Image (spheres, coloured by chain):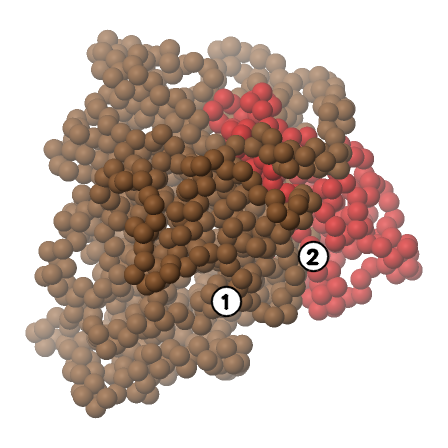
Chain colours: A brown, B red
Amino acid sequence: MSTEPDEGESFPRMRREKERVHGQQQEGVGIGWDGQTLREQFEALEERTEETGHYAGFEKLDLKQNNPIEYEQMFAQLRGDLVNARETSKEVAATPIVEQEGELCYGLFTPEGDSIAVSTGIIVHIHTMSEAIKYMINHDYEESPGIEPGDIFVNNDTHVGDVHACDIMTLIPIFHEGELVAWAGGVNHVIDTGAIGPGSMNVSQASRFGDGAYYTARKVGEDLKLYNSWKKDYPDKTRTPDFLKLDERTRMTGCLMIRDAVKDIINEYGVEQFKQLSREAIEDGRRGFRNRIQKTMLPGTYRGASFVDALYEGQENLTRAYANENHLMHAPSELHVREDGSFQVSFEGANKWGWHPYNCTPAAIQGGIWVMLTQTVIPNSNVNDGAYYSCDFHLPVGSWANTQNTETAHAYAWHFLVSAWAPLWQHLSRGYFSRGFWEEINAGNANTSNWLQGGGIDQFDKLHAVNSFESACEGVGARYVEDGEPHAAAIWNPEGDMGDAEVWEMTEPLPFLGRAVKPNTGGAGRRAGGAGFESMRTVKDVSRWLLYEMGNGYMTSDGGLFGGYPAASGYILNAQNTDLEERFENQDDYPQHDLDPESGDFESKIEGDITRRPEGISTPKEFDDYDMYLNYLRGGSGLGDPLERDPEDVVADIHDGYVLPRHAKDAYAVVVEKVNDEAKHNSAVQGEWELDEEATEELREERMQERAETAKPVTEWYEEQRERIQNEEDLIDDVKKTYESSMRMSKQFAEFYHEFWDLPEDFEFTLSEKAEKSLENRFKTGLKQKWDNPTKGHETWLGVGRDDEPEVPYTWTADRTIQDLPTPDASFSDTKAEPATDDD
Amino acid sequence: MPESYPREHIEDLVDDNLEWNQLHDMMSDFKDADRFQQVRDVLQERVDWDDPIIIPYADHLYVVAKPDGRWVIKCDCGHEFCEHDENWKMDALINVRDSEEAYLEIYPEDMHPHPDYMELREFFCPGCNTLLEVTNVMPGYPLIHEFEPDIETFYSEWIEEPIPTPETESA
């Protein structure tokens, strides 16, 4: 630890640092290295990186080459200190979100905002914090409000660098002898952001103004003390102030531990060696990423597309009448693996953003893809922004993936983000397959829902909000070599967990009636997708209490691979005005599960107003004591032809509660016979089954024959489909609106679509008046950009990629169809819109 | 870290005979340098035809070198689809699940996509009827050409080996 002499003050070294910085300021000396301003240092780094193709111009890794042991020791020490900071500070927090699920992470950054090393946890934010630091540098925070020793900054603005407002980050600069040598940053998911509805990720708002409180890269303290203006501000902008106060202390604890760790390492090795390490570690990470790709994949182009629904037509409590429409997310995904192992990721063809809270910013997309890559390409501790320097992202401006419009809502950006990644898992898996690394192949992931959220007056008669993170535990996509892990984790938190029911009950007035593996949630396949699970919750001791659902319903976002089927999609099940209290009193049966929605079991054990519908999203609705709510957490997708699954494994699936007996025959062509009515292997079904080998063999042969008889040549199907599209037969308005949105966003997608179906050049889908108006209103809203000064890294999505990039259907060009606003003052209010129904 | 796994170990990987702890070790270890060649060689031994495998393309599918110099996508049953840079799905058989009834064969009620919003396209090999791919897309979506490997760059720059031809393989 640091060896500061006790001078009777809390942070004497910080005070001396600050005096030194003030002295330098009077002489016009910046806080950057060798007297540069931070902005000058940042620009110089970008230029050197661009000129040389190596991070900060580091073509040689002198420290690593000449003193490899010390290099590894220093890096391992930093990494260990970051993990230690997370594990220790986690105990300060009171929310199960942090304490149980570990929704927390830390990073150590260069003065320019590039991550050197990271902790474990929700490391999506390593890059979002990086963007937030760059935002401060690029908008001259050194001049105002100043960046000085002991300063504390907070950010949760997604357009600056975040996924959504409920991830609040704390950043503190670390100085040494008048120079900024690093930043420590920590971020955690808070329980309530003060959005228009309770919970961290409300779903009923149309725009940013309903997302909750945004804090844009704000200085909130100095001398390592929070300003009174901050302490008196944010607690009133949330329904859960005590939780947020402890969350902040958590982040401060971690950041201060990291600050001490950096001081120690500088004391031990000297500041020049620390600077050298910080540069070399990132260049090493950049090279490591490319080396790994060259060792495990194939160069070339990988493509896919994913979709997810956000159905708002007819939903109650929407904040704007014009938000009363259905949205479908379209994510064409293209990965180009270049000859040098670097990545070009393109979402060209993505459709327009919408008046819903699932829009994304580049920081969200980049951070999101980054956390995925760390779970596949770089599954080790040598993770930092070096990987970012090996990836270009083409994110169409004005699409849901990069709105560049500060009016858009982002509260649950993950809904689109997670769904849009689904093909990227498969791109990597196709590469691994060709290369022979079959142990790395993964069909995909789960749609990380349902999100149980809500709030009101809780069991302690306090205003409260809930945000169950059971969703940190979903089924995982099937591997090539094994089934997917059941109820395991969520893509955004590799160390996720469902949390103890008892702990959730301490902070949520929602007692558990049951919790069990949910059958048929994982996709069928030779390797089955990991099963999800469900919790049946009731409500107790509340008043003016709201609950809502959030997840996929009409679409499954995660496809199968190599013949495996997608994971199941979601549905909503609630019961209100129930007789549950009487049932408890009379010790009668009551529903603990809804494991087979077709069984009628739930309905047979409860009287009340039952809502059962195959959708995934509902806006906040009132719940009272003894009402019921099903929290269904999704499964992962399958891999391989289900008829190739070992029939004995299907019998085991039945006994493990992963597959309902009737689906053994339908999905797997496996014949099972019930041999015992009494046995109870799981909550889903009663009985024990045995395999009928002979009947299975016959059935599988029949099934193969059926395939040959019922399937048709694709060429024949193509002609039928082409006619269908030309005549717009059996295509609903929501689907046609999505195509039109993508075609208006992207000339490349429009050409691709027309060429594939051989459509006339002037072909357009006929839309309803409502759909036409919806597109017009959003396209006319134009851009409202947050960054006055984009970084070089932003050029990959602001401009054109490399000139020698091969032609691919969706490849980016600058030729956009998006319409800019005519004047800087013009806004959405200039367009014709429905009157507001509420003030969001 | 093995620079190279024993041939038997790779055979067990291909034949699905490895225990979980062995697979886990393979995941955790650094990657062996000759995996591609070893897997390709084992697969070549497993198929019933002689066309040299250039790359494994997808489960059951390979890019192979034909005597006339073409590179084609071929199923392990022997069915040949198309040139390596074309979408094999155009030459496949297709079944589309786009009704409630068809969905209920695979998923319980309320747990499947809405047929108006999403269809499942099942692609089968015309030679052996194996289900090779299932895609979940909006109705009216074009077929996606998922993978266009840059085979030349892979062989010449990444593994620095000549691309197999019928001549080199039979030599």
Image position, residue A304 (x, y; %): 59, 48
What residue is shown with label 1? A799
Q: Indicate which label's residue lies in the foreground, 2 or 1.
A: 1
- Identified at 65% across, 63% down, the residue is A806
Quadrant where the image shows the C terminus of chain A: top left
Given the image, on which type of amino acid does mark 1 rest? Answer: Gly
* Picture residue at 37% right of the left edge, 14% below the top: A603
Image location (x, y in percent) of residue A351: 49, 48
Instruction: In the rendered view, tell whether residue A811 sits above or below residue A411.
Output: below
Q: Is residue B164 visible?
A: yes
Q: Residues within 10 Å of mark 1 (few under 14, many from 20)?
A: some
Please, which chain is the residue tagged with disc 1 on? Answer: A
At x 45%, y 52%, the residue is A399
Q: Helix, strand, or loop for circle 1?
A: loop
Q: Quadrant of the N terminus of chain A?
A: bottom left
Q: Position of residue A373 (x, y in %)?
A: 50, 56
Q: Distance from label 2 to label 1 (Cα)?
A: 26 Å
Q: Position of residue B16 (x, y in %)?
A: 68, 41
Which of the pair B1/A600 is nearer the observer? A600
- Residue found at the very far left of the displayed protein: A8
The disc numbered 2 marks a residue on which chain? B
**From the viewer's perspective, is A494 left or right of B7?**
left
Tell me the residue at 74%/42% (across/down): B90
Asked if disc 2 and disc 1 are in contact, CB closer than 8 Å, the reply is no
Q: Tag 2's secondary structure?
A: strand
Identity, as a three-letter code, of the amino acid under mark 2: Pro
- Does residue A61 show up? no
Q: Which residue reaches farthest bottom?
A: A27
Q: Which residue is mark 2?
A: B149
The label shown at residue A418 is none
Vertical side of A716 occupied by A373: above or below: below
